[in-house]
Image: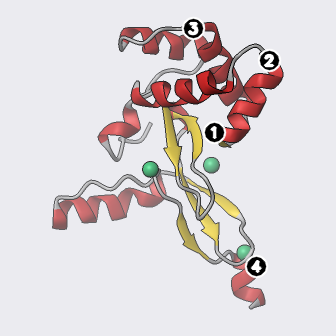
Amino acid sequence: MSKPLSPAAGAGQGASSVDEVLRLVRARGGRATPSRRVLLEVLFEADGHMTAEELAEAVQARAPDVHISTIYRNVEDLERLGVVVHAHMGHGPAAYQLATLAHGHFICEVCGATLEAPDELFADLAGTVKAKMGFTIDPHHFAMLGRCRACEEGG
Ligand SMILES: [Zn+2]
Ligand SMILES: [Zn+2]
Ligand SMILES: [Zn+2]
């Protein structure tokens, strides 16, 4: 494991299953409710990240009795408890993911392609910024925009 780049980056460390995340929720004073379990299951199974709307849809598909306002509140609460984080992926709505699986992104401004950005790519930049400005960057919170290889070569 590489060193977390920000205090928040290590928040969900070690939680690799729904049960572990719920344990973390309880340890931080939150409640492990059935609707929160469904939400975490959806996030664990999602290959990537989901907007609040997509999350609500997926949770309701699995548990139709869970009210939509409960789902949105759960997202907020789980984020406050540090087990879920959001990221801004360009101009669209924020995307949510498990804190343990959080990572940065590069998004092409031309075609919209999204590339996963491994943390080690930010290590040098993070070190330089920290040393020169005393600032700790959080490379997960905002996607970095630019142009993908195909668009760069094609245009
Ligand atoms: Zn934000
Ligand atoms: Zn592109
Ligand atoms: Zn991603």
Task: Tell me which numbered mark, 2 or 4, is placed earlier along the sequence.
Answer: 2
Coordinates of residue 120 in the picture (x, y in percent): 46, 53
Does the closest atom of ligand 2 sit within 8 Å of the Cβ of label 4? yes
Residue located beneath label 4 in the image: 150
- Quadrant into which the N terminus falls: top left
Q: Nearer the viewer, residue 122 or 37?
A: 37
What amino acid is at disc 1?
Ala
The residue lying at 43 percent from left, 26 percent from top is: 13
What amino acid is at disc 2?
Pro
Coordinates of residue 58 in the picture (x, y in percent): 77, 29
What amino acid is at disc 3?
Thr
Q: Secondary structure at mark 3?
A: loop
Coordinates of residue 59 in the picture (x, y in percent): 73, 24
Residue located beneath label 1 in the image: 52
Callout 2 crowding tier (Cα within 10 Å): few <14, some 14–19, many ≥20: few
Give the image quadrant in which the ligand numbered 2 is located: bottom right
Coordinates of residue 87 in the picture (x, y in percent): 52, 49
The residue lying at 60 percent from left, 21 percent from top is: 70
Nearer to us of marks 2 and 3 is 2
Nearer to us of marks 1 and 4 is 1
Distance Cα–Cα, label 1 vs label 4: 31 Å
Most extreme residue toward the bottom is: 155
Residue located beneath label 2 in the image: 64
Q: Are marks 1 and 4 in contact (CB under 8 Å)?
A: no
Callout 1 crowding tier (Cα within 10 Å): few <14, some 14–19, many ≥20: some
Task: Tell me which numbered mark, 1 or 4, is placed earlier along the sequence.
Answer: 1
Does the closest atom of ligand 3 sit within 8 Å of the Cβ of label 2? no
Examine the rendering and report whether any part of residue 10 can be seen: yes
Which label belongs to residue 33? 3
Q: Are marks 2 and 1 in contact (CB under 8 Å)?
A: no
